[in-house]
């Protein structure tokens, strides 16, 4: 019994020793784990709030806008300059206009809009420093209606309010023009809105990292509470188990058992000691894990595009997304690049866009078509002028009295085979279009001019392309052309006026006047043959004629080969006088229609208008001036 009592405390002592040892070694590890857990929870909560806030209460508005302030004075015109598009910061903008009643919104090139406004009073709205400004300018109090004006690429009528995206049909500076009825105040309530960037690239990473940090922090707190309890429960079980009592009468066995028990107790103590040592090897690692997770979270809070001073010195340029971009260097373009750029600029600055050409031609065809059907020149002034209007008006006068007289050529809306559109920023402007009417196999060369910004284009010449000739601009992709001075050669074999004078001289003198300056052509040959036939058919009359160019009706455009297209008008004055004092002249039906009588005993003066289109080769060429298009029309018959 004595040995048994002494053995039991010895077996229990290692357990008590283990109980005292574990708390002393576990205390510092528990404190570090608790601090790390709290830090993770705090950082995780902050990250979650920041991430959720970016997608909710801190989310920027989907649309931003700027409104123009009310001007100090009313004006019949409001001009919205292209600077308003810069408010969108490379995004599309929408322009909204509110007015008291009906108003018109027209779009055109900025320089054209300024030219159309001219001296009229107007309010200029433009974007500057993220806001709209309105600047009034005094001037004339009335302007015409811009609806239907050829100068503008588009015009829209609205009542009350209108919203339209700011789009431009081509490169360059564009503007919007607003008018009411021409005298009332134009709308100035202008608002420009654009889409705002609502992207939040850090929201999702912050929410994910915040959730991970919260879970990790809570896990560490739970592990801190359960960690020391496990060894205590094991020690409690070992302390509560009593040693087996020795059987009486077996002292040797009891001693052996006591020795075995002591050995077993020592082994158990060693095992517990080994388990405690194992936990000591794991616990110090957990604060390192806490620091690592906190470091990852802190790194997640920093923009990935941030670079240190050393990195910034070595890297070219870093964007906010962290992608490196190279700053472009300033270089001097080569000759080929400069030429191409100039061509693109000219093409972008043409006076008319393709849909404008279609719209103008549709209007011309409609006006001329109505006059053609009615055989009346009434209304032609809207789309015809110059020699074309004079010749067609005379034709309708003749046909009113001589219905069998030939009709003028019809003008169809298209198709446009070759366009030549000037890039001149000044007026008058000239456009040449080669079209083909549906009922004709001969292409027409139409020349249209715009005398001022507020005037529409009108046809001043309409001639057929002569058989066997080629239009000089055919096959060229160049639409933009440069106007030339008729009185200067400008790199041509002769001045345009000299070329017209040469053609007139050949027509006046006959075939013998053909020189190397003018190439033979069917138009000149037919006129000369007709003049000779008229002289032969009227032996009792003296017939003389003289062709002179009309300097005021000469227009010149440079062709793609550096030559020139010359559009001009010749006046053919024919005088018919009876050879005998008592002689009598008999006039043909078309002449009689204009003279008012079929016979005349006095001299008769006949005037013809001859529209011609010439091609003048570039300097250095050995070619002669060519007549590529022409038309003749009887204008008047006068008795002396």
Image (spheres, rainbow, N blue to C red):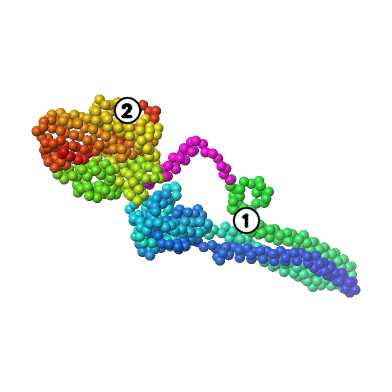
What is the CA distance from the residue labelled 2 to the residue labelled 1?
77 Å
- The vertical placement of 624 against 275, above or below, is above
Q: Is 277 placed left or right of 508 in the picture? A: right
In this view, the residue in front, 412 or 267, is: 412
Q: Is residue 330 magenta?
A: yes
**Residue 616, located in which quarter of the rendered image?**
top left
- How packed mark 2 is, by other alpha carbons closer than 10 Å (few <14, some 14-19, many 20 or more), is some
Disc 1: which residue: 303
- Image point 69% across, 66% down: which residue? 38
- The vertical placement of 632 against 67, above or below, is above
Q: Position of residue 481 (x, y in %)?
A: 38, 40
Please report the bounds of the magenta region as a residue range.
327-353
Disc 2: which residue: 517
Q: Position of residue 356 (x, y in %)?
A: 35, 48
Q: Position of residue 273 (x, y in %)?
A: 81, 63
- Image point 58% across, 47% down: which residue? 325
Image quadrant holding the C terminus, namely top left
């Amino acid at each position: 019994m004595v040995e048994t009592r002494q053995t039991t405390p010895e077996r229990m002592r290692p357990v008590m020793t283990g109980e005292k040892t574990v708390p002393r070694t576990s205390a510092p590890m528990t404190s570090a784990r608790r601090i790390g857990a709290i830090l993770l929870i705090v950082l995780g909560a902050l990250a979650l709030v920041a991430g959720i806030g970016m997608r909710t209460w801190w989310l920027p508005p989907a649309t931003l806008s700027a409104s123009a302030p009310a001007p100090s004075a009313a004006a019949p015109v409001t001009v919205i300059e292209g600077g308003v598009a810069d408010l969108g910061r490379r995004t599309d903008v929408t322009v909204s206009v509110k007015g008291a009643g009906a108003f018109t919104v027209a779009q055109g090139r900025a320089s054209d809009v300024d030219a159309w406004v001219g001296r009229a009073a107007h309010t200029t709205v433009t974007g500057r420093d993220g806001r709209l400004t309105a600047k009034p300018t005094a001037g004339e109090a009335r302007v015409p209606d811009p609806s239907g004006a050829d100068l503008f690429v588009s015009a829209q009528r609205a009542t009350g309010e209108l919203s339209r995206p700011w789009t431009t049909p081509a490169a360059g500076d564009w503007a919007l023009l607003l008018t009411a009825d021409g005298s009332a105040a134009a709308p100035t309530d202008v608002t420009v809105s654009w889409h705002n960037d609502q992207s939040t690239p850090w929201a999702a990473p912050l929410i994910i990292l915040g959730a991970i940090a919260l879970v990790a922090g809570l896990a560490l707190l739970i592990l801190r509470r359960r960690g020391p309890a496990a060894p205590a429960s094991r020690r409690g079980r070992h302390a509560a188990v009593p040693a087996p009592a020795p059987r009486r009468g077996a002292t040797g066995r009891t001693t052996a058992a006591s020795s075995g028990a002591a050995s077993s107790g020592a082994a158990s103590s060693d095992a517990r000691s080994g388990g405690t040592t194992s936990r000591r090897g794991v616990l110090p690692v957990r604060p390192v894990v806490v620091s690592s997770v906190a470091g990852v979270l802190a790194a997640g809070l920093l923009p990935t595009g941030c670079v240190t001073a050393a990195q910034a010195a070595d890297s070219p340029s870093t964007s906010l997304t962290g992608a490196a971009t190279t700053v472009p260097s300033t270089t001097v373009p080569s000759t080929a690049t400069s030429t191409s750029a100039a061509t693109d600029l000219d093409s972008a600055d043409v006076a008319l866009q393709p849909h404008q050409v279609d719209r103008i031609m549709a209007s011309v065809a409609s006006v001329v078509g109505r006059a053609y059907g009615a055989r009346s020149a009434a209304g032609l002034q809207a789309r015809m002028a110059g020699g074309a209007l004079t010749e067609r008006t005379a034709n309708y006068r003749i046909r009113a009295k001589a219905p069998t007289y030939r009709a003028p050529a019809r003008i169809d809306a298209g198709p446009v085979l070759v366009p030549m559109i000037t890039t001149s920023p000044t007026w008058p402007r000239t456009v040449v279009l080669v079209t083909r009417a549906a009922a004709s196999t001969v292409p027409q060369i139409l020349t249209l001019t715009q005398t001022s910004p507020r005037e529409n284009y009108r046809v001043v010449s309409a001639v057929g392309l002569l058989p066997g000739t080629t239009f000089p601009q055919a096959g060229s992709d160049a639409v933009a052309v440069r106007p030339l001075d008729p009185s200067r050669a400008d790199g041509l074999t002769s001045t345009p006026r000299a070329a017209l004078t040469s053609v007139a001289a050949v027509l006046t003198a006959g075939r013998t006047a053909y020189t190397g300056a003018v190439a033979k052509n069917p138009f000149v040959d037919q006129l000369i043959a007709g003049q000779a036939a008229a002289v032969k058919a009227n032996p009792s009359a003296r017939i003389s004629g003289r062709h002179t160019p009309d300097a005021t009706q000469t227009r010149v455009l440079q062709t793609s080969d550096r030559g020139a297209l010359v559009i001009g008008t010749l006046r053919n004055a024919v005088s018919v006088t009876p050879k005998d004092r008592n002689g009598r002249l008999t006039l043909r039906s078309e002449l009689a229609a204009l003279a008012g009588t079929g016979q005349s005993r006095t001299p008769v003066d006949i005037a013809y208008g001859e529209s011609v289109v010439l091609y003048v080769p570039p300097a250095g060429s050995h070619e002669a001036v060519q007549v590529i298009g022409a038309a003749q029309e009887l204008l008047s018959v006068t008795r002396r």
